[in-house]
């Protein structure tokens, strides 16, 4: 890295897509958080200190998307929630999050709402936290292009 160089992240350069529909109107802090369920490997250390590892092959996890309560994208999430509550079919979502300013990317083809978000009413604009269970999250991690 050369002296004086700087990298920039801009959430406005990120695409958030649920079932082909753009998502916008995020909360104040993290727009989305991917959390894998397990480590890639489990480790066992024998009495003599020999280490063995086993691949978990578990790529599932949870994805949390936080929207302002005023976001029109709550309508997209609510439609999935209604499908889940009424017919328990057709409620799987494909979710893509891609930073156009870096190689960072998340994709989950089989995602479903874990629970209904909390709801509050008061003087201030609140947030809606939509939590998805994800059968398999495919990710790419990289640095900023600029």
Image (cartoon, rainbow, N blue to C red):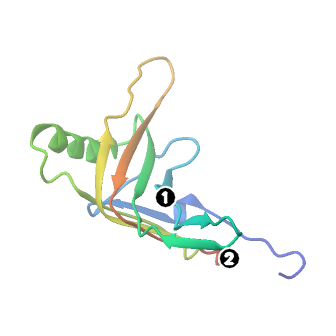
Residue 95 image position (x, y, % from top left): 34, 61
Q: Mark 1 or mark 2: which comes first in sequence?
A: 1
Question: Is residue 99 visible in this depiction of the protein?
Answer: no
Which residue position is annotated with label 1?
38
Which residue position is annotated with label 2?
146
- Residue 84, above or below 110: above
- Residue 1, above or below 72: below
Q: Residue at x 56, y 48 (%)?
A: 30
Residue furthest right as drawn? 3
Check disc 1: other Cα within 10 Å, few if <14, some if 14-19, many if 20+: few
Q: Residue at x 68, y 76 (%)?
A: 146
Which of labels 1 and 2 is toward the front? 1
Q: How far apart are the alpha carbons under marks 1 and 2?
A: 32 Å
Of residues 73 and 89, the one drawn nearer to the viewer in this rendering: 89
Quadrant position of residue 28: top right
Quarter of the picture containing the N terminus is bottom right
Q: Residue at x 32, y 37 (%)?
A: 115
Question: Is residue 138 visible in this depiction of the protein?
Answer: yes
Residues under numbered marks 1 and 2 in contact, where contact means CB atoms less than 8 Å apart: no
Along the horizontal axis of the image, is 91 left or right of 13? left
- What element does badge 1 sit on? loop
Along the horizontal axis of the image, is 23 left or right of 94? right
Q: Residue at x 50, y 71 (%)?
A: 54
Along the horizontal axis of the image, is 60 left or right of 32? left
Along the horizontal axis of the image, is 17 left or right of 90? right
Of residues 131 and 72, the one drawn nearer to the viewer in this rendering: 131
Check disc 2: other Cα within 10 Å, few if <14, some if 14-19, many if 20+: few
Residue 129 image position (x, y, % from top left): 43, 39
Residue 104 image position (x, y, % from top left): 54, 71
Residue furthest front as drawn? 47
């Amino acid at each position: 890295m050369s002296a004086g160089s700087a990298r920039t992240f801009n959430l406005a350069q990120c695409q958030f897509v649920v079932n082909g529909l753009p998502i916008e109107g995020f909360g104040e802090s993290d727009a989305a958080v991917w959390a894998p369920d397990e480590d890639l490997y489990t480790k066992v250390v024998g009495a003599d200190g020999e280490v063995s590892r086993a691949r978990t092959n578990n790529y599932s996890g949870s994805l949390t998307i936080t929207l302002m309560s005023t976001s029109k994208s709550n309508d997209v999430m609510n439609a999935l929630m209604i499908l889940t509550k009424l017919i328990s079919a057709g409620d799987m979502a494909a979710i893509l999050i891609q930073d156009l300013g870096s190689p960072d990317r998340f994709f989950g083809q089989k995602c479903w709402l874990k629970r209904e978000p909390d709801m509050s009413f008061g003087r201030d604009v609140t947030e809606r936290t939509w939590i998805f269970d994800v059968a398999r999250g495919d990710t790419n991690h990289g640095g900023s292009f600029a």
